Each structure stands twice: as C-alpha cells, then as structure tokens.
Amino acid sequence: MSPGNSAKIEIVDVGKEFVSRRGRVEALKGIDFSIGNREFACLLGPSGCGKSTLLNMVAGFDRPTRGGVLVNGAEVTRPHPSRGVVFQEPALFPWYTVLHNVTFGPKTQRQPSAEYLRRAAQAIELVGLQGFEHHYPAELSGGMKQRVGIARILVMQPEVLLMDEPFGALDAQTRWLMQELLLQLWERQQQTVLFVTHDVEEAIFLADTVYVMTARPGRIKRRIAVDLPRPRTLEMTAAPRFNEIKLEVLGLIREESLKAAAGSFAAGVSSGGSRV
C-alpha cells in the first residue's frame, strides 16, 4: 500500500479451494495484502497461480473458502457497480451501437437518461471514440472495442477498477497505446486499480505496486514498489531502474514457473506409474 494511503481493498488471509470429481484443488493460500486508495496495483505470476480467481473475489463473482475480502472496510459478498470489471474480451452487444453499449448499465439501473447520456459522452471522449458513437462493434478494431469496454465501465463511475488481462488479445503496438490511455484515464480519475497481467513490462509500466504470486497454491511471493516517476512515458522502459525491476520480477516468476513445471511433471509420472 502506498505510504500514507488508507486501505481501499483488503485481502485478509484468503484461501480458495475448488472441489471436483477428481478431488480438491487448493488454488489460493494465505493471501494477505492491502491496496491503498487511488493506488494502481498489478498481480503477476505463472499461469494457474490464481490471479484471476483473486480478482473475481474482489469483484464479488466468487467467495473465498477462508479469510475475507473487504472494500472500504465492508466485506465483499456480491458484485456492485462501485467495482467495475474489464475483461480480456469486452463482450459488447453486437446489435447495439457504441453509445448504446456504453449506456446499457445505467439504463438498466433506471438512472435518469439526461445524466447518464452526459456521462456517456464524457466517457466516449475520454477513450478517444468521438465520432464513433453510432458505429456497431463489427465496424471497430480490437483496440477500439476495448476502448468501448472501458468507457462502459467509466460511465458507471466506479471507485475500484478491476482489470483481467484487458489488453492480452491486442497486437503489441495497440497494447502500448491502450496502456498509455489507461494511465491518462487513471491520472485524471484516480480510481483504485487492481490489474491482472502476464506481461512483466506492462505491470511495471502501469503500477505503483507489483505483487508477484507463487505457483499454485497461489501466495504472495513478493511485493515490489515501482519507484518510477509519474507521468510514465514509453522512454522509461529503457531506463536502468525499469530494467532492474524487470530483471527482479522475471527472476521471481522464473523460479515459480520452474516449480510449477516440476510439479506437473512429477504428477504426470505418479499418475502414469499408478496405471502400471
């Protein structure tokens, strides 16, 4: 948590288990950290470590098996408009225009149309889609669709922005543009952000704090404060300090990825042996 910042999100000794016909799988164990008000935090870790599971619990889509998740000091038990979620795929309604996609949320909540149309116009302008209000998703590029997805969340004016690999499906150039756009929006609106990614450079470029998770069961292996100045620029990715942090994070993730690979190999050998 940033110095002097009160906690907005608190993850308190969270554990998560999934039960299937094959048995019990421990996805998360002893997760314990907090994110300050207006802080930008990123979760990094090897595949299958539980990053998205943890984000879904903050969103209210899932509940922990043990421990608790709190936002503004209150336990999260269900989804709420104050916590906006952006996924890798924006999942726009193809039969709605950009404007109708953006206003869908407040309209279904029966908010006054004059108010939400004003906010929608602001959100569309913020994400750089002026002039595309009456276009349909099929007429938009991948990056433009994700901008609509972000505008759809911004119009709800959430206090917390939860993002699950929102730029993972984009090409490299569009991804950088979207990262810069996101930082501009965050610096202007100052929501608390929890961002899940597999991309180390993306995490360092965006975040105040990076949490590196272990292989399953996911724990917090290390908290890394990203002490780079803001506003961030593309040139910073070539700075010595950026690359120092990058090497530290890559080393931590490599350790955990090797553990995960070794565990999978051992499980396969054991399974194969039991059939002989």
Image (cartoon, grey):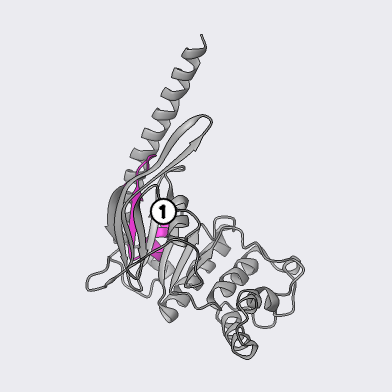
- Mark 1 lies on residue: 200
Q: Residue furthest top?
A: 276
Residue 25 on image: x %, y %: 44, 36
Asked whether 127 or 229 is in front, the reply is: 127
Counting the numbered discs, the total is 1
- SS at circle 1: helix
Q: Is residue 213 magenta?
A: yes
What residue lies at 32% left-to-right and 68% top-to-bottom?
73
- In magenta segment, residue 214: yes
What amino acid type is highlighted by mark number 1? Val
Q: Who is closer to the viewer here, 130 or 74?
A: 74
- Please provide the residue range marked out in magenta: 198-219
The residue located at (65%, 82%) in the rendering is: 130
Q: Is residue 149 above or below residue 168?
A: below
Q: Quadrant of residue 43?
A: bottom left
Tell me, yes or no, if residue 158 can be seen here: yes
10 Å crowding of disc 1: few (<14), some (14-19), many (20+) = many
Q: With 271 as the anchor, is 228 left or right in this view?
A: left
Measuring from the top left, give residue 40's x and y in whole percent: 37, 67
Q: In this view, which residue lies farthest toward the bottom?
A: 114
The residue most toward the left is 4
What residue is shown at x 46% (from left), y 50% (from top)?
53
Q: Residue 138: x percent and y percent? A: 75, 65
Of 149 and 276, which appears nearest the observer? 276
Question: 66 or 133, which lies in front?
Answer: 66
Residue placed at 59% from the left, 71% from the top? Answer: 147
How far across and down, in percent of the image, does residue 179 sit?
49, 67
Residue 244 visible from this viewpoint: no
Q: In what quadrant of the picture does the N terminus appear?
A: bottom left
**In the figure, 119 relative to 88: above or below?**
below
